[in-house]
Amino acid sequence: MTERQQREMAQRIPQSKFVYIKNAHHAANLDKPVQVNHEIINLLTEIEA
């Protein structure tokens, strides 16, 4: 899936957000766990508000 397709998919999903994590590959949570966790916490905080 291209980055463009991913961005378009995120636009169609309520309360979602596309986040690009530089140098992360297919398993971003393994490649960049600190950044992924940070973005997940941010998203959940936004949804909770």
Image: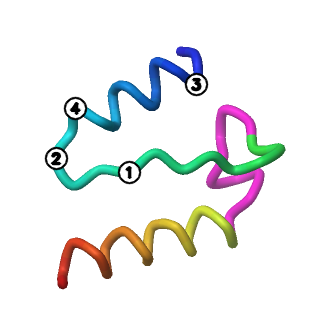
Identify the amino acid type marked 3.
Glu
The Cα atoms of the two marked residues, 4 and 3, are separated by: 15 Å
Mark 4 crowdedness (10 Å alpha carbons): few <14, some 14-19, many ≥20: few
In the rendered image, the vertical position of residue 5 relative to residue 44, given as above or below:
above
Residue 41 lies, in percent from the top left, at 43, 77
**Label 2: element kind:** loop
Mark 2 crowdedness (10 Å alpha carbons): few <14, some 14-19, many ≥20: few
Mark 1 crowdedness (10 Å alpha carbons): few <14, some 14-19, many ≥20: some
The Cα atoms of the two marked residues, 4 and 1, are separated by: 10 Å
Residue 14: numbered disc: 2
Q: Residue furthest right?
A: 23
Residue 29, magenta (yes or no)? yes
Identify the amino acid type marked 2.
Pro
Q: Which quarter of the picture shows residue 42?
A: bottom left
First in sequence, mark 4 or 1: give its number: 4
Identify the amino acid type marked 1.
Lys
The residue singled out by tag 4 in the image is 12
First in sequence, mark 4 or 3: give its number: 3
The Cα atoms of the two marked residues, 2 and 1, are separated by: 9 Å
The Cα atoms of the two marked residues, 3 and 1, are separated by: 13 Å
First in sequence, mark 3 or 1: give its number: 3
The residue singled out by tag 3 in the image is 3
Identify the amino acid type marked 4.
Arg
Q: Nearer the viewer, residue 20 or 26?
A: 20
Residue depicted at x 46% and y 18%: 5
Left or right, residue 6 beside residue 24: left
Q: Which residues are magenta?
A: 25-33
